[in-house]
Image: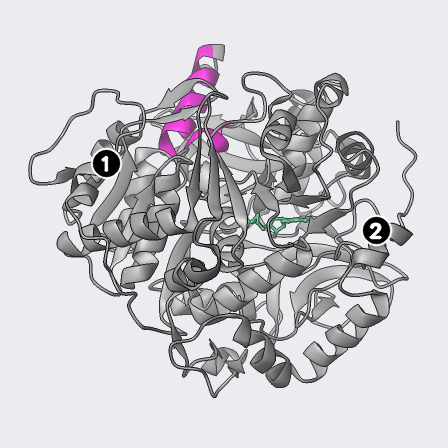
Amino acid sequence: MWEVHDFPVPADLAKTAHLDAAGYEKMYRESIENPEAFWAEHGKRIDWIKPYSKVKDVSYDASDLHIKWFHDGTLNAAANCLDRHLAERGDQVAIIWEGDDPKDDKKITYRELHRDVCKFSNALKDLGVKKGDRVTIYLPMIPEAAVAMLACARVGAVHSIVFGGFSPDALAGRIQDCDSNIVITADEGLRGGRTVPLKVNTDKALEDCPDCKTVVVVKRTGGSVNFVEGRDHWYHEICDAASDDCPPTEMGAEDPLFILYTSGSTGKPKGVLHTTGGYMVYASMTHQYVFDYRDGEIYWCTADVGWVTGHSYIIYGPLANGATTLMFEGVPNYPDFSRFWQVCDKHNVSIFYTAPTAIRALMREGDGPVKSTSRKSLRILGSVGEPINPEAWMWYHEVVGDKRCPIVDTWWQTETGGILITPLPGVTNLKPGSATLPFFGVEPIIVDGDNKVLEGATEGNLCIQDSWPGQMRTVYGDHERFIQTYFTTFPGRYFSGDGCRRDEDGYYWITGRVDDVINVSGHRMGTAEVESALVAHDKVAEAAVVGYPHDIKGQGIYAYVTLNAGLEPTEELRKELVTWVRKEIGPIASPDLIQWAPGLPKTRSGKIMRRILRKIAANEHDALGDTSTLAEPAVVDDLVENRMNK
Ligand code: WT7
């Protein structure tokens, strides 16, 4: 539909930018040639209680792997997001909350947010929460989620947010893994006019978590909930009773700030651990440069705080920068497909950051719902979570941004804490579909399967050569798994798990995961997790799960299921299995297609040949490649014959 072409920086944008292309190159070169000096300088953007004298202590050597930044400095993350703004911008709005219902909204100033956080911090202390304790947060997109995060940071507790769309089982697994003995939740969530039974889910999860003895409940909908005497506390009651004077706890730069669970290619989700100093420096610096944030602007990231995007670019980055950050409880299509743009107009949003899956879903509804709004406040558009296809990029640029707004396609991961590859607005010439160039201090390297560095225009596995301050430090409780997952495939480098192409201009094009991780609507899912949920059903003998191209979601979930002997596949059972997986993990893990497989293609040693299953799911069965090592080649013919994605 759109002619895809490159977009050189328009002259008017270049004029107002803080840097030009040569300036970026110079600053980038300095950051790579002398990271110590570069970060010693930029670390000062954060307020330190005790300034650091050491900047970087990193080894990627598997026998002695450690990552430390600013490690003799001390600080408090919440004080950086709140206290330090009070003198100059105490009455500026920190959070604009836009409810699920367009009639519901709220503005919270820095002074009010500071007071709320201090009160809840004291309430947490009264409940026995101490520095280093893990606090699970299972909340919808309401201001109390920001308050809870910042209160944890203020008292030195480590928050672990579990996305409100996860099931009781998934919640229980995460509570157990990090030995958390307190959960902060709400009576119900509200999304797209429908309630989400968060308290009911929490009660179910806690049946399997005997050590979790405290629950704090935010009243969101007022729906009736079961209340366990002695265990459950109303958020508003304990806050009302608490003092609003709570000095921030002095934390070491390398003290943990949060844990966030994310899926990998094998096993159960990993607790990605981020620490305080380097993370805050990196989140705030990227937020300022990548979105060209300017004082007084309204900035909106549509992510949920249950994902890392919400941590770094709704809460910590923007608030550290004294920005006004918009928090949206709802969904893009409620009450109608114009909602995003109506919210932009209502609150004068300058910077808008969302995921390609949302763009594609809205694009399908045509230009009408966009064009019925003004969007004249918009200045910069952002994309994150998965590769954005050039058609969606063009529509975002031409229709949403009226050809005025640069798009920053930001590549990063839960593990990286902040954006690593991205254009800078008014600085970088854009190519639709490319995340373009590395941020300061980030050295991308493309290697082949033997860890040989590939130079120039090339394609291969995307690694990062050296550390940056926002990098994860370990997998909570399993440092060995951290080393194995990220530093052994290509020794001496951080391996992202993504494939990548670099073009003749040095621009990076992410091609997607090269491991058994799939990206469904920008959410990361381990195929192994879905498989283990399926085989936990008593009628399932075996299951293999792969991703396949999906118009809206980017990738859909395709499951091959072998039933126990003697069982007849039925439509009813197919539905039952989908419901089962939703219950085991959550709606985001629902298989889109289930194919009954009398057998799975295996090598003679019994290994499932996923390469073949991926081809069949993608409807590319003409190019199955070498099948000579299959134990039973006839299995493949049956799978091709009965494929679901015709
Ligand atoms: C994976 C990380 C980063 C926060 C949201 C997802 C994919 C992310 C892009 C992009 C192409 C992207 C990668 C990455 N991804 N951003 N701009 N272009 N792919 O965080 O759940 O940790 O997933 O998302 O495959 O490895 P996550």
- Foreground of the two, 640 or 276: 276
- Foreground of the two, 317 or 231: 317
x then y, percent, for residue 237: 17, 38
Identified by mark 2, the residue type is Leu
Figure label count: 2
Q: Is residue 227 left or right of residue 382?
A: left
Q: Which residues are magenta?
A: 572-590
Determine if the magenta segment contains residue 581. Answer: yes
Q: Quadrant of the C terminus?
A: top right
Q: Does dot 1 land on a helix, a strand or a loop?
A: strand
Going by the picture, which residue comes out furthest to the left? Answer: 230
Residue labelled with disc 2: 430
Q: Is residue 620 left or right of residue 256?
A: right
Residue labelled with disc 1: 217
x then y, percent, for residue 244: 23, 53
**Looking at the image, which residue is at 32% across and 41% down?**
171
Spatial CA distance of label 1 from label 2 is 46 Å
x then y, percent, for residue 144: 34, 41
Splitting the image into 4 quarters, where does residue 292 fall? bottom right
Nearer-N-terminus badge (1/2): 1
Confirm or deny contact between disc 1 and disc 2 (CB under 8 A).
Answer: no
**Looking at the image, which residue is at 67% across and 44% down?**
383
Determine if the magenta segment contains residue 462. Answer: no
Q: Is residue 211 above or below residue 249?
A: above
